[in-house]
Image (tube, helix red, strand yellow):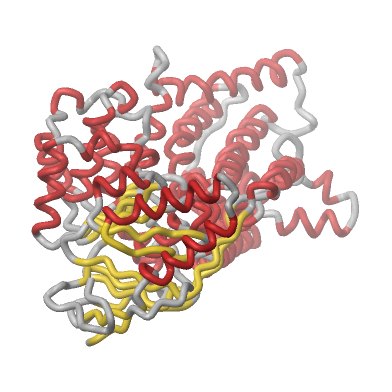
Amino acid sequence: MPVSERAVEVDVGHLSLRGEKDSLIDYILRVWDVRSFMFHEARTHVSSRGEHQALGNLWLIINPIMDGAVFYIVFGLILQMDKGIPNFIAFLLVGVFCFQMTTRCVNGSSMSIYRWRTSSSTSSLPAIAAPINENLRTWIAGLPSYLVLVVMILALPPLENLSPIAFLVVPVIVLQIGINLGISLIAAHFIARVPDLNNILRVSTRAWMFGSGVMFPVAKFAELGPVFAFIIHWNPMAWVLNHIREVFVYNELPSIEGWLIMILWAVVPLLAGTVLIWRGESSHRSVGDE
Amino acid sequence: MNEGGSVAGEMRANMVLQGIRHSQTYGRGKNEYAIEIDGLDLVVWSGETLGILGAKRDGINTVADIMCGSLSPSSGHIYESGQVINLSPSTEFLADESLRVNLQRVARARQVNGASLRGLIDVVVDEAHAGGVIDEIVDDIDSLTVARCQIFMALATGIRLLIIEDAESISEAFRDERVESKLHGFRRRGGSIVLLSRDVNFLARTSDRIAWFRKSEILMDAPARQIPIWYNQLTKAERSKEKAKAGQILRRIRAQFGPAAIRVVK
């Protein structure tokens, strides 16, 4: 600082001293305060995507129908593949649709803090709102695909009869929301610090897909050795897909162990990600400035 | 500002930065640069327009971030009188969204919701004469109307201090009668405006006082009209690579206009 003989006394009696960093509770309350903004941001983004297309937001429905139709035609009609799995088409559709939602949430959130910080209207809001907003946006855009999934499973042969067990799909999806969000927070935190990790994340989500039983049963992977069996056992998405298939396609009560692992994955990364972003809140500011 | 250790008479401050220290690295690879703020003292007086002159690499945006609270300094004290808004016109609005969506977005980001939000937008649109274009895409609306809406919306949320980054990008708005009268009213009620720019002539026209930042510290803090003379002299000497002359000018600036150390009185 330049040497100067000048000095000025300022009366700060009417001013308040800005406090230290928010406590974790205050930080979470700040996020709660901007919930209306996050919903508005997510809704606007989803609806504006269809604005320049003739069919507008109908594409949110048409796209998953076309995706499902392609899988049905290729695997069901042309290849007539079943891999020994009962109702393989439903098995495949659940895997593809549900895992797609997770990859969209996680990959979409990866650079979210960067984008959030470059917008002056959001730069003063808590950084954690960025990945939350991205997840919200993905779920709003993706929920129609879940409805399409239900309709396709009910409409495509072999026809399935739904029992009350099928309603257990709701808590599984709630847990999937928690799992996606927790992993998104952690990914967004580290990628905001080291953007290069984004490339690793994309490869990892692909590997994660193979280890989650999207297109074939995970049991095949588990048989490769104890390390694979351990990874598969603790892979939350393998349980999410397994539970959705059991309650919705096979009309079976899923195992308690799977529920516990999903709860663990829905809670621990969410807490860890929240704490990481809260602790690094100030340093995240530099991310968006170049 | 009163000098020489006297209390600043009747003047009230809206923000005081005292002994701010902060280090931060920006950019990556070849574009990486560091900002090292070491003991920054700065007062923003009630009713004034303070220009902050300098480039990003001089740390002016870091100072703005510290002022608005989106960056916490490693040490130092910040005294404030109320809510601060940091407006960056180039990124405030989404260019491919309608004006209405953008106004809703900004208001919600500042926690204005429900009926107050609708009322606020009506008032802003009315004052900015933007009723006819509210549902048009921002890119298709003239820049003056957009700038008016951005400034009016910021002022309508009950703030005490408005910071405008890249202020010269909306220089047209500062010549607009409606904006001028609105900003004048805001300052008369005790609000303060901080304009960040690297354009000395723009700041000299629009500010009462200028704090000229160079290498993360205040080189000169003086009434706006005095800055361009010294700024131009120093720039000319540096461009013509007259090191001795540039050094001499720097020493004179520091001796006569170096920033005042701040002592707070409670």
Q: In x, y percent, where is residue B33?
A: 61, 55
Between A35 and A94, the one lying in front of the other is A35
Q: Left or right: where does residue B31 sit relative to residue B235?
A: right
Q: Quadrant of residue A72?
A: top right
Between A235 and A139, the one lying in front of the other is A139
Between B97 and B145, the one lying in front of the other is B145
Does residue B85 appear in this view? no
Q: Left or right: where does residue A225 sit relative to residue A88?
A: right
Between B142 and B17, the one lying in front of the other is B17
Q: Is residue A55 above or below residue B117?
A: above
Where, quadrant-wise, is the C terminus of chain B in this rendering?
bottom left
Where, quadrant-wise, is the N terminus of chain B in this rendering?
bottom left
Q: Quadrant of residue B16?
A: bottom left
Q: Residue at x 23, y 36 (%)?
A: B173
Q: Residue at x 17, y 48 (%)?
A: B114
Q: In x, y percent, where is residue A180?
A: 56, 50
Q: Residue at x 50, y 31 (%)?
A: A145
Q: Left or right: where does residue B255 sit relative to residue B23?
A: left
Does residue B102 appear in this view? yes
Q: Residue at x 83, y 51 (%)?
A: A222
Q: Is residue A43 above or below residue B69?
A: above
Q: In x, y percent, where is residue B142?
A: 26, 25
Q: Is residue B108 above or below residue A60?
A: below
Marker count (numbered): 0
